[in-house]
Amino acid sequence: MKKNGLTTTKAPLIERVREAGELFIQESYYDLYNEDNQEAWKKIYCKLSPLWEKYASSKFLKGVKLLNLTSDKIPNLSDVNKSLESSTGFKLKAVSGYLLPGIFFDCLKKRSFPITITIRGLDKLEYISEPDIVHDLAGHGPMNTDPVFTDILTKIGFLAEASAKRHLSISDPNERISKIKSNIRALARFFWFTMEFGIMKENGNLVVYGGGILSSPGEMIHSIKSDEVSRFPFQLEWVINQGFNPAKMQPILFFIDSFESLYEQVKILEQWLHEGKLDNISEGEPVIKDEELKGYI
């Protein structure tokens, strides 16, 4: 009898964990992957790998080798974490699905990266609307081997915590919530245009380091080659005021020169946060709902 597998939204384990109100998966899960799951990983990995060689940052490619990612089988997080521990001390944590911003940023603060362990079906190899292990591990995992990159992630986590603390003294609940939402929206946009859809210059050429691009064959080619994409030098004031549509190919991207220069931008972001410059940024995506502020208000 064929195992149910861990196909996205159809996994009994995931449903059970969610019904219990839990977020992190503590029990062993790897043996639940079935043949179709492994075949899906192999097929999408074989599509991504040659494109990585053409378009990915050298730091990402170095991370792929360090984590020993291959098309042979879906990686086991316990094996990946052994490699990460020696490089950056970051840890990947298995989760049951979407995390509220507060929980996600708290993970980053504690030097851990949430990984959705479900995997897309064979009929949806190119794109799915929700994260899976291809996006989270193949797309994001290798960059977690870079010390400066993970320091940026950690810094973002602490800024999210600071955004809540600095508004606790505001007595008017509507004003307090409005400012916290604005702060979180700014951080989410920073994350989107860097960690998800970031590109950078290496040896005079544009390459990709954002996990949202690196986990999508179509987005990879689109981001570097398409005439329909506007590519600008990273401008912090533009990034935090620029909305985005996660369901479409991205029309606007911002490139950096190095992770060291990006870290300097995070320091400016921190300064702006404490100066109140993130309290009234432009409306639009991502829309932060009241229920997503759990842990902040």
Image (tube, rainbow, N blue to C red):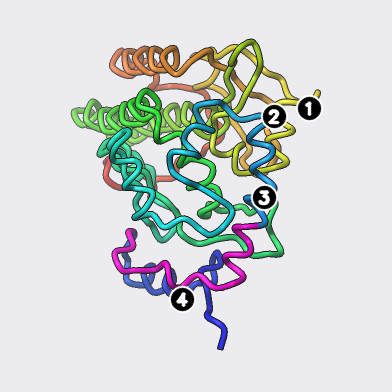
Q: Earlier in the sequence, mark 2 or mark 3?
A: 3
In the image, residue 8 above or below residue 170? below
Secondary element at image label 3: helix
Query: Which quarter of the rendering shows the C terminus?
Result: top left
117 vs 167, left or right, is right
Residue position marked by numbered label 3 in the rendering: 46
Secondary element at image label 1: loop
Q: CA distance from mark 1 to mark 4?
A: 40 Å
In this orientation, which residue lies closer to the viewer: 19 or 88?
88
In this orientation, which residue lies closer to the viewer: 257 or 45?
45
In the image, residue 195 above or below residue 95? above
Closer to the camera: disc 4 or disc 3? 3
Secondary element at image label 2: helix
Dot label at residue 12: 4
Residue position marked by numbered label 1 in the rendering: 226
| Neighbourhood count class around disc 3 (C-alpha, 10 Å): few under 14, some 14–19, many 20 upward | some
Q: Earlier in the sequence, mark 1 or mark 3?
A: 3
Q: Position of residue 88 (x, y in %)?
A: 31, 33
| Neighbourhood count class around disc 2 (C-alpha, 10 Å): few under 14, some 14–19, many 20 upward | many
**Outermost residue toward the bottom in this view:** 1
Residue drawn at 54 percent across, 73 percent down: 34
